[in-house]
Amino acid sequence: AQSVSQHNHHVILSEAASLELGCNYSYGGTVNLFWYVQYPGQHLQLLLKYFSGDPLVKGIKGFEAEFIKSKFSFNLRKPSVQWSDTAEYFCAVNSGGGADGLTFGKGTHLIIQP
Amino acid sequence: DGGITQSPKYLFRKEGQNVTLSCEQNLNHDAMYWYRQDPGQGLRLIYYSQIVNDFQKGDIAEGYSVSREKKESFPLTVTSAQKNPTAFYLCASGFRDLREKLFFGSGTQLSVL
């Protein structure tokens, strides 16, 4: 069974700081990788995804993530965070593209201080 | 206005009672999912369905049941066998190719009286 590990459960940063949220997964085969975000009071929504090609993927709102196969990692980055980035961030993995659901990490609660 | 509708937003369950959470989508998605979200636990998959009249257990199916009689609807019943039902329940839908994103509903908060 696949699993996803997010290293930090709570992160507090000041505005304009750089962000990196760690994500490691356990599945050894072909994977599709996702970062979802849950803003306060809003639905979960997709930030970005990777399934093939360039391992550096760009998403909405200036976020990007790098897939490093040798490290089983898919870390999320943003060069300069804003107060509006305060949210819960979830890394998720699906193996092989099948519709058997996503396996999510436990989430990282990010607080940006103005 | 397309999307996923979950109801009710808040639900209370008495001891020994079964309760049903509704999930409807008008996005023409084949696949639908139920997740449970607990603080610090992330989202855990309860049940999923890839096609009408078929569904599969997820990681934490015990104490839950589902049906998929229509493409648009995937109700979740929390049975009395679920000893710790208090949680936030999220329904999602998507195409069968999961390289496309999932769409999530706004959730139902279930509490035990």
Image: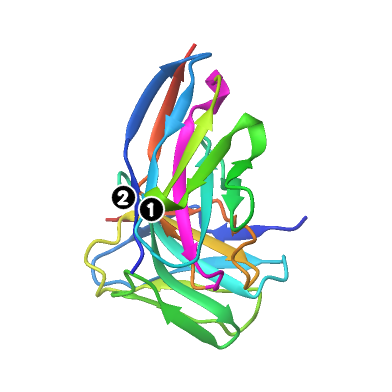
Q: Are marks 2 and 1 in contact (CB under 8 Å)?
A: yes
Q: Residue at x 21, y 66 (%)?
A: B83
Q: Is residue A72 visible?
A: no
Q: Amino acid at mark 1?
A: Gln
Which mark, residue A12? none
Q: Are marks 2 and 1 on the same chain?
A: yes
Q: Residues within 10 Å of mark 2 (few under 14, many from 20)?
A: few
Q: Which residues are magenta?
A: A81-99
* Foreground pick, B101 / A66: A66
Asked whether, in this view, residue B21 is left or right of residue B26, the answer is: left
Q: Residue at x 54, y 40 (%)?
A: A65
Residue A50: where, in percent of width, then height?
Answer: 58, 52
Q: Secondary structure at mark 1?
A: strand
Above or below — where is B111 with respect to A109? below
* Foreground pick, B8 / A92: A92
Q: Which residue is the site of mark 2?
A: B41
Chain of the residue under label 1: B
Asked whether, in this view, residue B33 is left or right of residue B103, the answer is: left
User: Which coloring applies here?
Assistant: rainbow
Which mark, residue B37? 1
Asked whether, in this view, residue B9 is left or right of residue B25, the answer is: left
Residue B29: where, in percent of width, then height?
Answer: 67, 70
Above or below — where is A16 with respect to A97? above
Q: Residue at x 72, y 65 (%)?
A: B27
Q: Secondary structure at mark 2?
A: loop
Looking at this view, name the residue that lies furthest to the right: B1
Q: Quadrant of residue A13?
A: top left
Q: Residues within 10 Å of mark 1 (few under 14, many from 20)?
A: some
Residue A7 located within the stretch drawn in magenta: no
Q: Amino acid at mark 2?
A: Gln
Measured in 3D between alpha carbons, the distance from the residue under mark 2 to the one under mark 1, in whole angstroms, is 7 Å
